[in-house]
Amino acid sequence: MKYLKKYLLHRTTFLIIAVSVQILVLIQVFLRFYDQFAYFYGAHLFIGIILVFVIINNNMNPVYKLSWTVPVLLFPIFGGLFYILFGGKKLGKRAKNKMQSISDETQELLIPQSSTLHEIENHNRAAANQARYIQQHANYPPYQNNETKYFSTGEEKFVSLKEELKKAENYIFLEYFIIEEGKMWNTILDILTEKAAAGVEVRIIYDDFGCLTKLPYKYYRKLNQKGLKTAVFNPIRPILSPKYNNRDHRKIAVIDGHTAFTGGINLADEYINHIEKHGHWKDSAIMFKGEAVWSMTVMFLSMWHYLKGIKEDMSQFKYNTRQNYSSEEKSDGFIQPFADSPLDNEPVGEIVYLNMINKAQDYIYITTPYLIIDQKIITALTSAAKAGVEVCIITPHIPDRWYVHLVTRSYYRDLIKSGVKIYEYSPGFIHSKTFISDDEYAVVGTINMDYRSLYLHFECGVWLYNSKIVQEMKNDFLNTLKVSEQITAHKLKNRKKYQSVASSILRAFAPLM
């Protein structure tokens, strides 16, 4: 009875009821026109056809166009309505203009590193081209004077994050898609509360959709009462709205401007395997110290200013890394943090991934929880494999969402036929998002290989060249491979027929998931 009451009173229940009522009202409105159904249906079919032309002429991904065209034509009455509500990939014009003004401000703070680009070019022109692309189109430059540390599990990151948070003297910035009460978050919250009481400025951003079932309603009030300044991305309201299509999927921690963390690990207990959810949870993250932290600081402050509607001097949060990190042994190759926004019509994350695949000469190793890819990535992966590049991908064996996993498996056959090696992480769920190539390049961050991450969400990642952790990431991948099951063409033939049929149907709507 206690648990029943808890779920009945949860805000998710109220949201479901509110949205259901709105849908029922719409249905009732349609039913009132039943006597004129032929005219009513014809009008909506005409509107649907117009929407199809709008979709076709839109500059969105072709697969996304197809996924919306089918329901709009099959269900003219509701298909068109849902496209209008959820088909766009952007926030409103006002929100875009607001974000653009902040983006212009940040460009002035992120000074292009021409000397660093020249240094990379002296090593490798292809690497310089990749760094130049990120600098010119994401506005985040490469850096050279940094220390880096790779975490192959959430448990490892948790230990280091606690240590670094306890050292904070000036400020702590946290931006996470998911925060959930439990051992991990409660431990961090105690540290943050103690630091705030000691005068350290603590700012927290969390995504309301990501935390919908994780945190109590208006949880930010509790944090504010503890002296922790909090902003909520896209607060969920009980109304149908297209803005919920965009989410803040980043995972960022910045301490005093000299230390930063990012990767796939959210602040919830499954990420440190304190609770078992979908078997063993495999994830990864990176910590770095030095000049590159400034990019992560600006990244966080840009989102903070957007959510809070304030303007402050961001430069006051810049740490003098040149003065405090002068020893050459602290330099670890080249590192380039970058952000990806759905508002700029530039799929930075996807292009970074494509460049790594297309330029790989010996191997490309990938871990991803979701393999829901468009034709560009399919062509890149299969072409690389056919050319003799070792292409290996690890996906989960135990999914977090069964229908998404069915879609992921629908891509296996064509990839394997072309020579791509697919493995599933046997102990459970792999949430890590990493690319490693040719012992030289790597990317670690928050960007999944699905349409939502690549086109709809605010994301971030770190591109690495000639860093010692590229080898550490490779070793982690090879160790993960040892406990993963290779999926072969023979094994695919033994799949149950209904699974193959379901996969094929769901794949048509993959970009909408």
Image: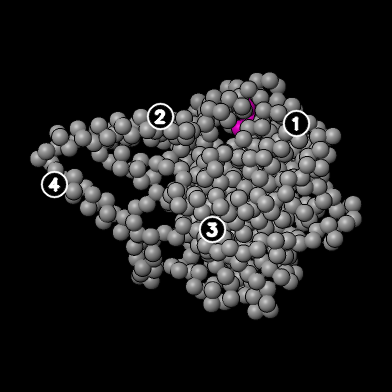
Which residue is rendered at x = 53% and y = 27% of the image? 375
Task: Characterize the local packing of mark 1: few (<14), some (14-19) or many (20 or more) Cα atoms within 10 angstroms.
Answer: some
Q: Is residue 132 above or below residue 458?
A: above
Residue, disc 4: 32
Earlier in the chain: of badge 1 and badge 3, it is 1
Task: Characterize the local packing of mark 4: few (<14), some (14-19) or many (20 or more) Cα atoms within 10 angstroms.
Answer: few
Q: Measure how far apart labels 1 and 2 are at the Cα level.
A: 35 Å
Residue 163, image quadrant: bottom right
Residue 120, image quadrant: top right
Q: Is residue 10 above or below residue 501?
A: below
Residue, disc 3: 306
Earlier in the chain: of badge 2 and badge 4, it is 4
Residue 323 appears at what percent x and percent y? 85, 60
Q: Main secondary structure of the magenta part?
A: strand
Task: Characterize the local packing of mark 3: few (<14), some (14-19) or many (20 or more) Cα atoms within 10 angstroms.
Answer: many
Earlier in the chain: of badge 4 and badge 3, it is 4
Q: Measure how far apart labels 2 and 3 are at the Cα level.
A: 32 Å
Numbered circle sitting on residue 56: 2
Q: Residue furthest bottom?
A: 197
SS for dot 3: helix
Numbered circle sitting on residue 126: 1
Q: Amino acid at mark 2?
A: Ile
In the depicted view, which residue is nearer to us: 192 or 107? 107
Q: Amino acid at mark 1?
A: Ala
- Which segment is the magenta one? 419-423
